[in-house]
Image (cartoon, rainbow, N blue to C red):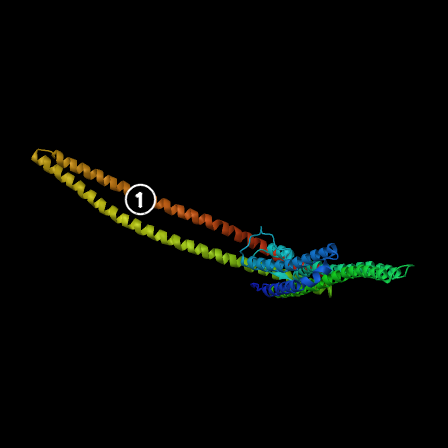
Amino acid sequence: MAQPGRQARPHFSQPIRQIFLMLMVIVLSGFGAFLALPQVLPVFQANPYLNGFIVFVFAIGVVACFWQVLQLIGSVRWIEHFVSGEISDTVRPPRILAPLASMLRSREARMQLGSSSTRSILDSVATRIDELREITRYIVNLLIFLGLLGTFYGLATTVPAVVDTIRSLAPQEGEASVDIFNRLMTGLEAQLGGMGVAFASSLLGLAGSLIVGLLELFAGHGQNRFYRELEEWLSSITRVGFATDGEGPAELGAVGAMLDQMNQNMTALQEMFAESDASRAVVDDKLGSLADAVAQMTERLDRRDQSAEALARVADGQDRLVDLLAQQGAVAGEGMDAESRMRLRSIDVQMLRILEEMAAGRQESLTELRRDIDILVRALAPKRMQRADADQAAGPRALRAGRGPRAEGDG
């Protein structure tokens, strides 16, 4: 049976060592060129256009090598940020990791790949790395070609000059030996000019191809290490199963497909249970807070009930006091004086106000309790609906996964 993939944090090395070695090569090459410049500059000036073009191609090759290493730095950063969730889906992935980004984003939080998907990703990454190397390889060959081109161009100008020099050495009537020697010197100057073009272009082309090839070697080491680390990380999140990829009997392929599908269903069911446990924990926390609020409200209502009982006893005592005073006034033949009546009236007003405040507080507490219960019901309703939908969808999916490959095997 297939094993579920493991969530592993990638560990990639930045190509710091390769960048340091490449910079050392550039610095040493520049220092050597600076030391040899006074001796070779007159030779290079024999054909400045061709030599300048060779230097321009050499600069492009150096920039291309460093660009390859910078691509690796961006790819390593993107993978680390993507796995840690610090990068959004709107950020464009590096060109090397475009297929990896599309596959991992399609699986969202379930970062798990099949063996065929892993092979496809590795092949695509290897192809893209080879495409980057083709530029520097072409530049190396182009530098060699330009050096040979300058060599043959210099030889092409030297050979006719040699022929002309040999022909000019034939003595004329009445010509002195000094004139013949002057013609020999003029011919040798033309030959040396052509040889300067040949040697200068060859030196520039071969030296440039050597330096660019060395930079490409260091960049290739960084790319190979990145590919190995990517392969190791992908193997840690690859799901291994019994799928035969079209090899072997059809029945074995059908069984492997069925087991693979069952593994996917079990993984989805496990994730659904994990989400259900998390939502249940949240609901338990909310229920606990609601129970605490209800307990506090009950204590508050109990205290208010005790206050209401005390106030009721006070009201009864007041009624008895009024009756007693009325009886005393009837006996004395006089009613209560105005001051006593005002005090009794103020006591009645205060008692009514206290009763109204207690009723309003009780109504407010009940309203808060109803609102909290409504909020809890609204929070629990979507979870129950999602759980019911997931349970209904998981059953037919498992049945289809079990019946589909069996039907294919029977067919």
Image location of residue 6, percent across then percent down: 57, 64
Q: From this viewpoint, is residue 373 visible?
A: yes
For the C terminus, the image quarter is bottom right
| Residue closer to the observer: 257 or 173 | 173
Left or right of 161 on screen, residue 344: left
Q: Quadrant of residue 123?
A: bottom right
Which residue does the image show at 34% across and 46% down from the upper left?
365
- From this view, report whether residue 259 is shown above or below residue 347: below
| Tag 1 residue | 361
Furthest residue toward right: 173
Which residue does the image show at 37% across and 44% down from the upper left?
367
Q: From this viewpoint, is residue 255 visible?
A: no
Image location of residue 168, percent across then percent down: 87, 59
Query: Which element type, helix, strand or loop, lies under badge 1?
Result: helix
For the N terminus, the image quarter is bottom right
Image location of residue 178, percent across then percent down: 84, 61
The kind of residue on which mark 1 rests is Gly
